[in-house]
Image (cartoon, rainbow, N blue to C red):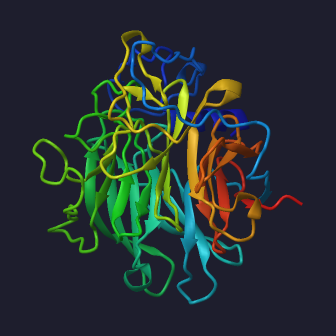
Amino acid sequence: MRRAALSAILVALLTGCRGSAPSTPAAPAASPGPAASPSATARPPTAEPSASATGTPPPPAAGTPAATPREPRPVTLVPVSGRNWTRPTESGVYPSASGGPPGTFVAEQDGVVYEVAADGQVTPILDLRDRVLRSGNEEGLLSVALDPGFAANRHVWIYYSAGNPRRTVLARFTREASSGTIDRASQLVVLEQAQPFANHNGGAIRFGPDGMLYLGFGDGGSQGDPNGNGQNLGTLLGKIIRIDVRGASADRPYAIPANNPFAGRSGARGEIWAFGFRNPWRMSFDAATGALWVGDVGQGSVEEVDIVTRGANYGWNVMEGDRCYRPSSGCDGSGLTAPLATYTHASGRCSIVGGPVYRGTRVPEIAGAYLYGDTCSGEVWAVSAANPGTPVRIATGVPTFTSFGTSADGEVILLTFGQPIRRITSTP
């Protein structure tokens, strides 16, 4: 497939068919069908609304990423294999079943998970293509995470799209004891969420330092959040949830932690940890501080970085980033949590990809910095996690960028459609 076509498809995956007018949601398709051909109307950088003079937005956030580097400093991106991955969505460390050096896993959107061994050998270890819905560009196998107790229980958690009816599924699988293969028959469905549209599925499973499972849900799709899910505590859509899956079983798939902010509240889902998100495609916990960072994909103008805290409201669809979403009618930003950083769609930017806080040792240029990038422009930025200020652009030219990952040696890698995996290294 040509690079231009791959780029357009990736934009659809992350941005979710942003219409040309934020106040006019697109009509849903009559029924699921094959993925639409990419088109310019699927992701136009529309005229950016100015902040409303009549609204009360949250406090100002950090500005648009700086083109002139400051600390942190620029880095180099190096391909680490000759294999061109088709549509990779997730990667992480994968221990060797034989006791040898650990490798990595790579998940492809069509529903296959691969093991990349320490010697570079690539082996499919789970094939869910018969269960995974791929009728929409944003649907598919979206996230994979190993259980905190993986060394003992061999549990692997997967979040994917399914059909009839359209929904997303959080499921637990178990790796076979004698090999790296994940047993298809071991699936335990833990949670299912109806999806009214084919876009904005969110899709990051992350285990916190508290051992709880956190999962990001998009607002349900179309554009502009037509059903008001982001601000509705009665649905999981537009939320980051927190559940206890340590004793998951068919009879009791998960428990709601008693200290969740809305546990026991009438009319609210107890699973919710934070709300007001549009499409939290990628998020990560800082290994040093435990802070949860998320890159929330904007509508047509503003992308944002958030640090997620218990019970906080991140504003969608009252706000898009640090701006009133519908400035002509004003907005009240009181009680909302402002993003830590934002950027606009200037210079061909379109969709944020949230990354990790770098806690490795081999790339001092980005020590202690939170990393994120943009799908369309191929830029990567860093912002100090300890003392957030103006983000610094540390790399450019990452084509069809979709996700960050971690290699077996603890370093940061970048996933791109139709390209090899790239590793962040120090600049010579």
Quadrant of the rendering where the C terminus is positioned:
bottom right
Residue 338 % position (x, y): 45, 37
Q: Quadrant of residue 376?
A: top right
Q: Is residue 353 left or right of residue 65?
A: left
Asked if 178 appears above or below 313 in the picture, the reply is below
Instruction: Relative to 365, say whether 233 is above or below.
Output: above
Image: 166 above or below 207: above
Farthest residue toward the right?
Answer: 428
- Residue 114 locus on image (x, y percent): 56, 66
Please tell me which residue is depicted at 40% across the width and 19% down the height of the picture.
26
Q: At 79% across and 58% down in the image, what residue appears?
A: 78
Point out residue 98 in the picture as x, y percentages from the top left corner: 56, 89
- Furthest residue to the bottom? 99
Q: How many marks?
A: 0
Quick check: 267 left or right of 191? left
| Horizontal relation, residue 408 to residue 333: left or right | right
Residue at image location 19% in from the left, 40% down from the top: 234
Residue situated in front as seen by the camera: 335 or 193: 335
Q: Report whether residue 330 is seen.
A: yes
* Residue 80 shows in the view: no
Is 140 placed above or below 158 here?
above
Q: Report the quarter where the N terminus lies.
A: top right
Q: Nearer the viewer, residue 173 or 226?
A: 226
Q: Residue furthest top?
A: 328
Residue 87 x %, y %: 59, 49
